[in-house]
Amino acid sequence: MQNAIVVLNAGSSSIKFSLFVERGDSLEPNVRGLFEGIGTAARFVMKAPDGSVKAEKSWPEENKLSHEEAFDFIVGHLRSELADNRLIGIGHRVVHGGSVYTRPIRVDQESLKVLDTFSPLAPLHQPHNLLPIRRAMERMPDLPQVACFDTSFHRTQPEVAQMYGLPADLREAGIMRYGFHGLSYEYIASMLPEIDPKAAQGRTIVLHLGNGASMCALLGGQSLAATMGFTAVEGLPMGTRSGSLDPGIILHLIDRHNMDARRIEKLLYKESGLLGISGISSDMRTLLTNDDPRARLAVAYFLYRIRRELGSLAAALGGLDALVFTAGIGENSPAIRSGVCRDAAWLGVEMDEQANVEGRRRISSDSSRVAVYVLPTNEEVMIARHTRRLLNN
Ligand code: AMP
């Protein structure tokens, strides 16, 4: 009998899940899948590691399912996949750990209350992340539930990197730079020693370019600075998020455009970024194959802001040894990688175009002063590792 760990990543209308089984020192993926369309037309699919479908089911729109029902359905299926392995706990992705949780925790009623208090800091994610934890604690009170935070990894940053130029009492009230995508950066940092020991000990900038996009400066594998701050809207423009703005714009929207907080929230999170600029799509693939000048402008702005942030993060590091591209756009778009590297030539980045187009792991030329890599991220395995470590201690 082997130990097994379930990993859940719950969003507003979907739950991603995976099952890992311990084999010696490693955690092997067993099945993974997605329950989407919660509250609308629900769909469940579960796949084997080779991508073959092991189970699927769809529900008509009239038959809406709740988060709780989706959770119960997933757990039911995972139980049948466990075979004779022993489930030791569930690891959950939780976006916000505030300034309190600098590492994963085993959740109890007390810490669940604390996590609830972070919901106003991440209203679009935190409440959904907490739902399956609550349900699991009701249904399986003896099974450990572990929360892994997107913010924890950034708590190694120096104080100046974690603050804003606001009065001290506001900082004490929690208005600070938390940083996000921490599980992704931590996974990449864990891969570096094997791939490039010099970069692992030195100065690396990781570009997590997906529908959500951010960048992180790693010094010796620890977070030194990042583009996302108080919320996951700061920094780069994203699929539908604006990225950094002059805060004066918010005041102007309130004063002159009669917008209230909810309207501005929708504007900044759902209607801006690549979608807002192009008026066409939030999807980078669509924009890269569209000749419309607005699509080109959206891509140009994305690249321009990466160029600016790269300079800023390289300055925080005092130089650069390696760049790492990851997430949907970073892992799959030679055109974006090529644009970023061209803009970073002044930092000593020289790309091997052939390697880039072929999607090799190392895409810099032999003479490049800065090594450039494409590494698939894996937040799920990071959560499974944390869960195992915590429960084994
Ligand atoms: P993620 O949030 O990490 O799943 O990334 C989603 C983003 O990756 C979307 O904007 C996709 O358009 C983009 N993406 C996926 N494949 C490609 C590709 N081959 N070329 C460009 N963008 C891609």
Image: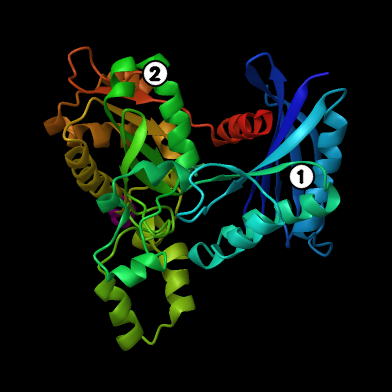
Coloured how?
rainbow
Q: Which element type, helix, strand or loop, lies under badge 2?
A: helix
Q: Which residue is mark 2?
A: 193
**Residue at 28% over, 81% down:** 252
Q: Which residue is mark 1?
A: 44
| Coordinates of residue 2 in the picture (x, y in percent) | 78, 20
Alpha-carbon span between mark 1 and mark 2: 37 Å
**Residue at 63% over, 18% down:** 26
Decide which of tag 1 and tag 2 comes sooner along the chain. 1
* Count of labels in the image: 2
Identify the amino acid type marked 1.
Answer: Phe
- In front here: 38 or 393? 393
The magenta span reads 293-297
| Coordinates of residue 393 in the picture (x, y in percent) | 64, 30
| Coordinates of residue 236 in the picture (x, y in percent) | 33, 51
Image position of 95 with respect to 248: above or below:
above
